[in-house]
Amino acid sequence: MTNTPSRIILLRHAQSTKNLKDIHGGKGEDLTEKGIEQCHQVAQFFKGNLDLKRLRIFASTSIHTRLTADVICKDLNLVLEKPFDFKPLYLGIADGLSREELNKKDPVSAALLDSWRRKEIEIKQLKVPDMEHYMDFWKRGEALINNLPRDCDSVMVCSNSLFILLANYLMGNHPEDTDKYRHIDIQNCGLFTVVTNDFKIYKIDRTLTNIENYGDAPRLK
């Protein structure tokens, strides 16, 4: 064991065709040309700000998250890791549908998801038919953090729902204990980074965070 703190770096996937279609959840789609360029920018940013010898990169099961991680790993000459049960939130009847399609199929659920995005409701109020229970999702995220390797810096390439889950977890926004587990606005390749010595207390690293006005990391175009 060393005394060097560990970083946990959440990275939302690069732009994909799924984003252009405004699709909820689903298996994911290919990256756009802009998305691939965003991956190269992230890799260069990591080269200038992280010790690559300490870096481990993980990705969720969605197609666009895996492709994002693959491009970054290739640029950094790293091997993509495979963590346990790294799956996004299953959105029930909304999963795989565009916002327009969902509005036609179930306008009530579409309106509820819009309220979630506007931060008007917390996660336990987001009740879409057949959606995975929020506490099952929370426990999966907790297991992901607990099973990360120590004595290294871990990049977790996430879908939007996973990014929001893990960021809330690392900020201590438990869905049963607080009303703070809410949506977070994240651009493609948005970063949220914490530093920890014991994997119990987490401090935001503002130089490697570029969401919600937390830090100085560059916004990608």
Image (cartoon, rainbow, N blue to C red):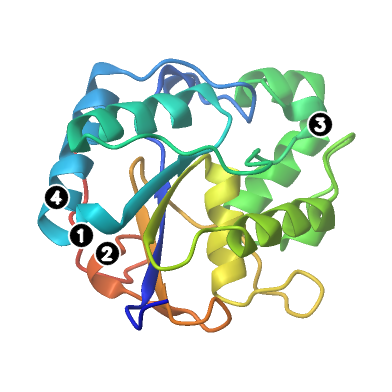
Q: Answer yes or no: do the residues labelled 4 and 1 have beta carbons within 8 Å?
A: yes
Where in the figure is residue 55, as x and y percent of width and height?
31, 53
Instruction: Tell me the residue that label 1 is attached to.
Output: 50
Q: Residue at x 67, y 51 (%)?
A: 115
Mark 3: which amino acid? Answer: Gly
Can residue 41 be seen at all in this image of the molecule?
yes
**Left or right, residue 91 beside residue 210:** right
- Categorize mark 4 by other alpha carbons within 10 Å: few (<14), some (14-19), many (20+): few
Q: Residue at x 37, y 63 (%)?
A: 152
Where in the figure is residue 12, as x and y percent of width and height?
42, 44
Task: Give the number of the disc on residue 206.
Answer: none
Mark 2 → mark 3, Cα distance in angstroms: 33 Å
User: Which mark is nearer the camera, 2 or 3?
Assistant: 2
Q: Answer yes or no: do the residues labelled 2 and 1 have beta carbons within 8 Å?
A: yes
Mark 1: which amino acid? Answer: Leu
Mark 2 → mark 1, Cα distance in angstroms: 10 Å
Q: Residue at x 76, y 69 (%)?
A: 175
Q: Residue at x 24, y 17 (%)?
A: 33
Of 170 and 161, nearer the camera is: 170
- SS at mark 3? helix
**On screen, 196 above or below 86?**
below
Task: Give the number of the disc on residue 208.
Answer: 2
Instruction: Tell me the residue that label 4 is attached to.
Output: 47
Mark 2 → mark 4, Cα distance in angstroms: 12 Å
